[in-house]
Amino acid sequence: MASVTITFNPDLEGDIEEARSILDRLSERSAATSVSPEVVREKIIALLRGYGEKRTEYIRQVALAAPGRAAFADLTAVVGSAKAIGGTHSAIERAWRAKGMSTTFISTDPSGNARMEPHLATMVLEVLHDQVDEPDPLRSARF
């Protein structure tokens, strides 16, 4: 038997998300029901489909920073304000969970810096390129 201690401040949303992420990774249910990369890609496409420029750029900045963290100041510049970051982050997480995903899409630390798992970040950047940046590859070839 292994013993794991998780310490977090329940008043900080970032701490709660980080603790939830750890618990999700350790849960037997998560281990038993691994989601295929194709399904994760489809969930990412569905998540990004209805988002405007600010939420899409927020997600892009976090994915680009992986495996490190996107700085709170940089994210504030993208979204517009610290208050908007909180709303953006929680809306994205709710949408991700509503799509049946048990893992955290983006986690934040107490300083407001955001992080995404590297394998997820790679898929997000591919989807952003394929579906958002270049949805029609022939468009750039037209005169």
Image (cartoon, rainbow, N blue to C red):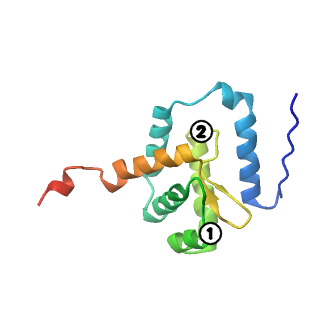
The residue drawn where x is 43% and y is 61% is 52
Q: Is residue 103 left or right of residue 3?
A: left
Callout 1 crowding tier (Cα within 10 Å): few <14, some 14–19, many ≥20: some
The residue labelled by disc 1 is: 72
The residue labelled by disc 2 is: 101
Numbered disc 1: secondary structure:
helix
Callout 2 crowding tier (Cα within 10 Å): few <14, some 14–19, many ≥20: some
- Badge nearest the viewer, 1 or 2: 1
Residue 40 place in picture, x, y as percent: 50, 37
Kind of residue indicated by mark 1: Phe
Numbered disc 2: secondary structure:
loop
The residue drawn where x is 84% and y is 47% is 6
Would you place residue 76 above or below residue 31 in this image? below
In the rendered image, which quarter contains the C terminus? bottom left
In the rendered image, which quarter contains the N terminus? top right
Q: Marks 1/2: CA distance?
A: 25 Å
Q: Is residue 16 left or right of residue 70?
A: right
The mark nearer the N terminus, 1 or 2, is: 1
- Which residue reaches farthest left? 143
Kind of residue indicated by mark 2: Met
The residue drawn where x is 16% and y is 55% is 141
Residue 58 place in picture, x, y as percent: 52, 62
